Image: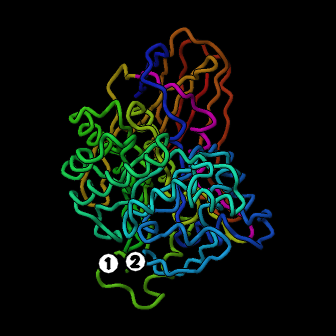
Amino acid sequence: MVQKISVNQRREIGKRSPLIYGQFIEHFHRQIYGGIYDPGNSLSDEDGFRTDIIEAMQKIGTPVLRWPGGCFVSSYHWKKAVGENRTPFFDKAWRVEDSNSFGTDEYIKLCRKLNCEPYICTNAGTGTAEEMSDWVEYCNLEQEGEYAKWRIANGNPEPYHVKYWSIGNENYGFWEIGAKSAEEWGRLTAESAKMMKHVDPSIELSAAALADISWNINLLRHCGPFLDWISIHQYWDMMPQINNPASYEQCMAFTDQIDRSVCEVRGILTAMRLEHKIKIAFDEWNLRSWHHPNVHTIEQGRSKEEYLTPRDKNDDNSTYTMADAVFAACFLNAMNRNCDIVGMANFAPVLNTRGCIYSDKSGIVLRSTYYVFDLYVNYMGDIVIDTWERNEASYMTVTGKNGTAADVKILDILATKWSDRPGIAVAIVNKHVSEAQHIELEFGGLEGPAVLYTLNGPSENSYNDIDNKQVEIVRHNLGQAAGKLSLVIQPHSVNVLQI
């Protein structure tokens, strides 16, 4: 069957924020130490940062980088990681020693190399409202007070002007150090926000939340007037204890109602009449959760072979296939369609673990999800426009990881245009594992050269590894197009059509 799709560039859904293509990095395994921060490596610059990783992050236009956690932040005290005298500490979240050699000043230096906005997540587990506000002083005040003077003494005379701050990380969860009840969270967040904005009223604040009515109502009742954002997280293929990645078909089942949590939080904000004041920051997301057995459990692993060594399984590049790429594209399509309420999203993490970039001492591998960001950042427009099906949409039945069958749309299509030049760019995702999809696309009076960029591999299980590149973007010149175009979309592929 030919799927008939219409695009109307005069019907604008909204302008998406560039921050929805954001990234995240945490003090976990090899994301920072031995990852992007690797002093002494021949590939690192004079500041200890891996130039190949920075170049790869620049190519996907990293707009914002969330740091330092994640679970790590809930027992992190930032003051011990600035200045000359830094003492290693035992990270109780991940049960390893952290040298404290990468702290606030190094993070800001990294953001400047990337030309991205910093986004600092504060310690609302073992930390205090005062400690959070002191951090804002250190980063943003010119010279007033102890902490701005400390930054200057540390060789940084100009303020860092950190605009985006998050109060806490997943403090609703039993696994989090310093977890809080809904009532406790509302009070702590309000006092923290008040003190932080007394230091710098220009900052934008988020707070840890989830798609839960009682948690969010307590938070927003206490803190709604102070907040600019509300933070939500989600991983679909959960593997903290057992590293059993979902198959391609199981991953496609996860694409059903991929924006459900966004819709639920939107409803709460609307009910409380805050939908025009507070945006959603989906500031941790990935298809697959991180594997860290015997840590977020009552019975802890005793030996490092039980809780530390298994984390290496996260860096098996064969895990990250076209399933990950197709899912990531569907997620980004959903965030674009919700651009009126979703203003930021952060892929978790950018490097190693489940990241879109893998590194070892000698180089990097760009995983399948990296190329999804490449397509959306560099080939898609910034204005979301209307699309609709002129005939009945095609569905396929897939069985999820939980054994439940789901009917999901085969095609996921998002149309955009540019605010600074003519033309359209249409993302076309074919989820079907084996069947190409035939599309007839109508786009009104627009005429011009058509180019299709296709991200795919030989099979749904294709992946990239050291000296083994199976997944890449291929450009197809389609010639001149005038108002209508017929396309054949490869199975298990992510595509961007530009006209």
Residue 247 locus on image (x, y percent): 41, 60
Asked if one can make out residue 61 in the rendered structure from this viewpoint, the answer is yes
Mark pair 2, 1: CA separation: 8 Å
Q: Name the residue under label 1.
A: 297
Numbered mark located on residue 293 in the image: 2
Residues rendered magenta in the picture: 362-387
Give the side of residue 223 with respect to residue 438, left or right: left
Which residue is more in the foreground, 306 or 398? 306
Residue at far left of view: 214
Asked if one can make out residue 458 in the rendered structure from this viewpoint, the answer is no
Residue shown at 57% from the left, 49% from the top: 140
Q: Residues within 10 Å of mark 1 (few under 14, many from 20)?
A: few
The reply to whether the C-beta atoms of the residues labelled 2 and 1 are less than 8 Å apart is yes
Tell me the element at label 2: loop
> Quadrant of the image for the C terminus?
top right
Residue shown at 56% from the left, 72% from the top: 80
> Quadrant of the image for the N terminus?
top left
Which residue is more in the foreground, 359 or 31? 31
Tell me the element at label 1: loop
Give the side of residue 73 with respect to residue 271, left or right: right
Q: Which amino acid does label 1 sit on?
A: Thr
Numbered mark located on residue 157 in the image: none
Give above or below for 383 relative to 135.
above
Residue shown at 42% from the left, 45% from the top: 281
Residue 36 locus on image (x, y percent): 66, 63
Residue 215 locus on image (x, y percent): 23, 53
Q: Which amino acid does label 2 sit on?
A: Pro
Which residue is more in the foreground, 368 or 1? 368
